[in-house]
Image (cartoon, rainbow, N blue to C red):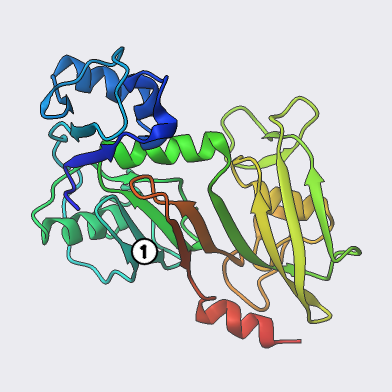
Amino acid sequence: MEPNTLDYTIRQEDCGATLGTILRRELGLSRRLMNTLKAMNLIFLNGRTGYLNRFPLPGDQVRIVLPVDKAATVRPESLPLSILFENVDYLAVDKPAGMTVHPVRAHQSGTLANAVNAHLAGQGISVPFRPAGRLDRNTSGIVLVCKNRYAAGAYRRMLDTGVLTKTYLALVHGCPAHPAGTIRAPIGPVEPRSIQRQIAPDGKPAVTRYQVLSDQGNHSLVRLVMDTGRTHQIRVHMAHLGHPLLGDTLYGGHREAIHRHALHAHQVIFPDPRTGGQIRIDCSLPEDMVRALSER
């Protein structure tokens, strides 16, 4: 599989659709990327320039040549990196709690971006750092990184169509009264420039599904899936339910058992945009959450 090309064979069921429609539907190409490909004559049908308004026939061969990407802007830095999955489009790593994803004013080195760019540089790849979603500095677990523009566009399409599922594990104070449920409560900032969030009638809609996996008495292990992606959504929703995360002092949690908010990105499931096959990435609980879970 070539990282800089996409190949597709027109099927019988594609008949009646234009080439542009097929590329959007079957290869997940964004309109922006397709416009770039069209302008640069990088779409080929049976070895010749392919026009998006053409109606291809079964057996026709489509090849997309992806445009050269921009170079990396974050300095590569050799750091320990726990790789969970990698193919030509995506890299999934286990981010430890305490590591910042992006360089910021206070953290220009030692970030996940520095580490990932060093890993890719070892493969001769220099591209912008494109994490598919972000984790707070003190949230551990899976960070999915898009290795090219096509992968980034496909990820956004997966989010829009709801075919990507990301699961979190959290340790919360006490145990919810119901073993499973859905929290529907809008979220907004406490103040205009505050990082802290709250349940707000005029906030953005937010939906979190939860399931209790283990009740330890004073605390419990909860599995969570967000149907929306608001800042601090899980932390705010669990506090709203009356069960803030262990260690989450910003939202009412306490640090007796763990010295950071006990939240871990545990699993990601999504279709491979090139093959349609399912990709499942798992990341086990880190040691600090395992220890906290065992305490009573």
- Let me know if residue 25 appears in the view: no
User: Is residue 223 positioned above or below 54 on the image?
Assistant: below
Image quarter (top left, top right, bottom left or bottom right) of the C terminus:
bottom right
Q: In which quarter of the image is residue 199?
A: top right
Q: Which of 276 and 55 is in front in this view?
A: 55
In the image, residue 207 above or below residue 77? above
| 230 lies left or right of 151 | right
Identify the image quadrant of residue 249: bottom right
Which residue lies under the disc numbered 1? Answer: 93
- Report the residue at 35% width, 30% height from top: 29
Viewer-proximal residue among 259 and 217: 217
Residue 82, located in which quarter of the rendered image? bottom left
Who's the residue at 84% across and 57% down the image? 242
Identity of the residue furthest to the top in this view: 53
Count the labels in the image.
Answer: 1
Q: Which secondary structure lies at badge 1?
A: strand
Q: In front: 142, or 8?
A: 8
Foreground residue among 278 and 83: 278
Q: Where is residue 53 in the image (x, y as percent from the top left)?
A: 31, 12
Q: Where is residue 218 in the image (x, y as percent from the top left)?
A: 81, 78
Judge whether 231 appears above or below 35 on screen: below
Residue 41 in view: yes
Amino acid tagged 1: Val
Where residue 214 appears, x then y in whole percent?
Answer: 76, 78
Q: Which residue is drawn at 28% across and 52% down?
A: 113
- Sort mark 1 into few (<14), some (14-19) or many (20+) by Cα contacts within 10 Å: many
Residue extending farthest right: 177
Q: Give the residue at the far left of this rendering.
A: 124
Give x and y (percent) for residue 20: 34, 20
